[in-house]
Amino acid sequence: MITAASADAAVSELFGGTVRITGQRPVYGGDINRSYRLDLSNGERVFFKCNRPEKTVLFTAEAAGLEALRRPGTIGVPRPLAVGTDRERNASFLMLEYLESALWAPGYWEMFGHELAALHRAACRPLTGGPFGFPEDNFIGATPQKNTPRASWVAFFRDCRLLPQIELVGERLDASTRHRLSRLLEHLGDYLPEPEFPSLLHGDLWSGNAVCGPDGKAWILDPAAYVGHFEAELAMTELFGGFPASFYRAYHEANPIDSGYQQRRDLYNLYHLLNHLNLFGTSYLGAVREISYRYMGNG
């Protein structure tokens, strides 16, 4: 991946000095960035997303996540091509290889399950400070995501996932819910096991962040990557409707899911619900209260 002073400069460096941008079409679906398909004079296309000039950090973090997920070679991940700030467009940007999406082919979900399991079972690069975390902080949606490595998965999920979100939501939580969440942090090790092995996770894997590519396989997009417990990834896939049962059966064939996962799923998703509460408002407050009560009761 290169750093470029403009979209035109990136295209010229990546594809040759005579290649230029000949067209731009909006691509809809995200709610944080503006996205486009850029048509090039050599007949190729690239995916281009942009935001305000000061938001370059969003794109450098995303590119690092994409590179990490590409490294094991187990599942489709678009290649980041360039990042930079374009003064003419008054925007920071990330340029990626362009994927022509396709309709699901027979066996798509089974293959997706097997390939995601292979990603989770792939060896992770060592981190200084412990196996759980990531070399740098990144973002979950528009919210900063802390990734300071920890030796323990429970400590990482407590200190780098739940605690920052609880602190961010602050007084929007009623006193009883804040008390239950505080106690939950103290007793998190009673509910979450340490994994047998660390897994590289996409970190924000729901149906909107996976597409069927031209090869008929799943490609995963817009990561919030880190190393953690694969159960946290599976929980996120179930938060907003879930994937078909064939996906989970195939995943279980390649990476068995412990029977206790169902009792832990909503605790993992508490992180994402708190984040949605912080990003989108009080419509997520009821779900946060319900999970805190389920684990901590009236205590």
Image (tube, helix red, strand yellow):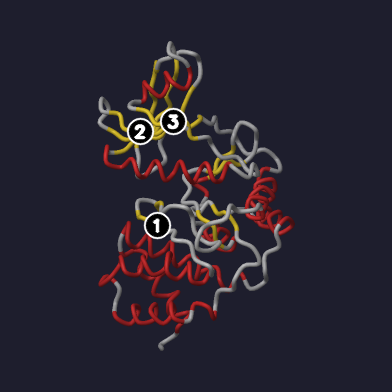
Label 3 crowding class (10 Å Cα cut-off): few <14, some 14-19, many 20+? few
Task: Classify mark 2: helix, strand or loop.
Answer: strand
Q: Is residue 152 above or below residue 180?
A: above
Q: Which residue is mark 1?
A: 145
Task: Classify mark 3: helix, strand or loop.
Answer: strand
Q: Give how far apart the Cα atoms at labels 2 and 3 are.
A: 9 Å
Task: Indicate the position of residue 137 as horizontal and vertical percent values.
Answer: 41, 54
Q: Are marks 2 and 1 in contact (CB under 8 Å)?
A: no
* Residue 140 visible in the current orientation: no
Quadrant assignment for the C terminus: bottom left
Give the mark nearest the N terminus, 2 or 1: 2
Q: Residue at x 50, y 55 (%)?
A: 226
Task: Indicate the position of residue 229 as horizontal and vertical percent values.
Answer: 57, 63
Task: Classify mark 1: helix, strand or loop.
Answer: strand
Q: Closer to us: mark 1 or mark 3?
A: 3
* Residue 148 visible in the current orientation: yes
Question: What residue type is disc 1 on?
Answer: Gln
Q: Looking at the rendered structure, which numbered label has been put on residue 84?
A: 2
Question: What residue type is disc 3 on?
Answer: Ile
Question: What residue type is disc 2 on?
Answer: Gly
Task: Indicate the position of residue 55 as horizontal and vertical percent values.
Answer: 30, 42
Q: Which residue is mark 3?
A: 2
Choose top left, top right, bottom left or bottom right for residue 182. bottom left
Q: Give how far apart the Cα atoms at labels 1 and 3 are.
A: 24 Å
Q: Residue at x 60, y 53 (%)?
A: 124
Q: Give how far apart the Cα atoms at labels 2 and 1 are.
A: 21 Å
Q: Report the front residue among 40 and 173.
A: 40
Residue farthest to the front, as pictured: 128
